[in-house]
Amino acid sequence: MKKKVLSLALVAGLVLGLAACGNTNEGGDVNGSAANENNKDLTEITFVLDWTPNTNHTGVYVADALGYFEEAGLDVTIVQPPEDGAEIMVGSGKAQFGVSFQDYLVPLFADDNGLSIEACAAILQHNTSGIISRAGEGMDTPKGMEGKKYATWDLDLEKATIKHVVEADGGDYSKVELIPSTVTDEVTALQSKQVDAIWVYYGWGGIACEVAGLETDYFDFADISPELDFYSPIIIGNGDWMAENPDIAKAFLSAVKKGYEYAIEDPEAAADILCEAAPELSKDLVVASQKWMADQYKAEVEQWGYIDAARWNAFYQWVNDNELSETPVPLDTGFTNAYLE
């Protein structure tokens, strides 16, 4: 799963470019104006992914395939984003809901850009990203990255995270060799020794290595520092739209919740649904990932989607303390549990 973080420089250009962006599904534009006549009494919703379909998104595809959206009075169109544009589409009202990550939102929450974005549900309860490497090469802890090639996107927040975990483990960050990332396939990149260490979301990139039979070492950022247990990924909504349409927002999230609970209870059936919607995916990878993700969607909480304010704030406080944003990110803002059941 490719890592991508918005920069402030992209915001203005992406907003201006949205008029040229269309629905990637057949039969309608981004607002679903060509919805089927049989669905003319349903409320049209556009949901934009953060990237290509994967098991982060399964609950949404289940809700669509099993009629949960229609039962809730909704006609939901699932679209893929323009380049780095899921947040911009939602914030500008081109989509009502979408997928993002708490760390992606730093430049948007710290800047008065006129976008209305609010996290309204946690897809996973914990940050399941970290560093993966070939097994037995000493990178099972962050200090082991010294003298090794790390594939970097050259982003301030990303590099600060690596520096933080390496130094927390007693290592010297200046000894980590930063290599510009061209990684699209973790398995190939590691097997070819193009790089030694890669930032992955374990539920996809890590599981892909397992399915390929590649032995790896791995450490979670959240295990090194609790401030890095940020919400990753999340469902975001257009805050203004949700405030004006609270019942519709609740109906949408209720249907999505049913979708993720189905994926928890029957991961193999949920994997079949995702593969039918995205047949280009590897069935073996999807099934293995789905089984792993089943324990991550809710983890220890009873309510799917719940966002804990203390954990939400802890990450942004860390960002502010380390001056990783041009202006401080406001605490106690940017998220809500109000639309969950």
Image (cartoon, helix red, strand yellow):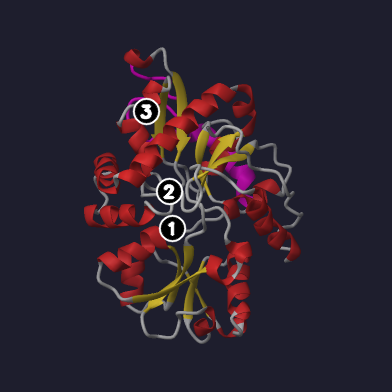
Residue 29 falls inside the magenta stretch: yes
The picture places residue 17, in percent across and down from the top left corner, at: 55, 38
Q: Are marks 3 and 1 in contact (CB under 8 Å)?
A: no
The picture places residue 301, in percent across and down from the top left corner, at: 51, 49
- Front-lying residue, 238 or 55: 55
**What amino acid is at disc 1?**
Lys
**What amino acid is at disc 3?**
Tyr
Residue range corresponding to the magenta coloring: 9-36
| Residue at 28% across, 39% down | 277
- Front-lying residue, 186 or 269: 269
Foreground disc of the pair 2, 3: 3
Horizontal arrangement in the rendering, residue 136 relative to residue 335 (left or right)? left
Q: Quadrant of residue 260?
A: top left
Report the quarter where the N terminus lies.
Answer: bottom left
Name the residue tied to disc 1: 2
Other-residue count near label 2 (Cα within 10 Å), few / some / many at <14 / 14–19 / ≥20: many
Disc with the residue nearer the chain's start (2 vs 3): 2
Name the residue tied to disc 3: 68
Q: Does residue 136 appear in this view?
A: yes
Q: Are marks 2 and 1 in contact (CB under 8 Å)?
A: yes
Between the residue at mark 3 and the residue at mark 1, the CA separation in whole angstroms equals 29 Å
Q: Quadrant of residue 5?
A: bottom right
Horizontal arrangement in the rendering, residue 37 relative to residue 9 (left or right)? left
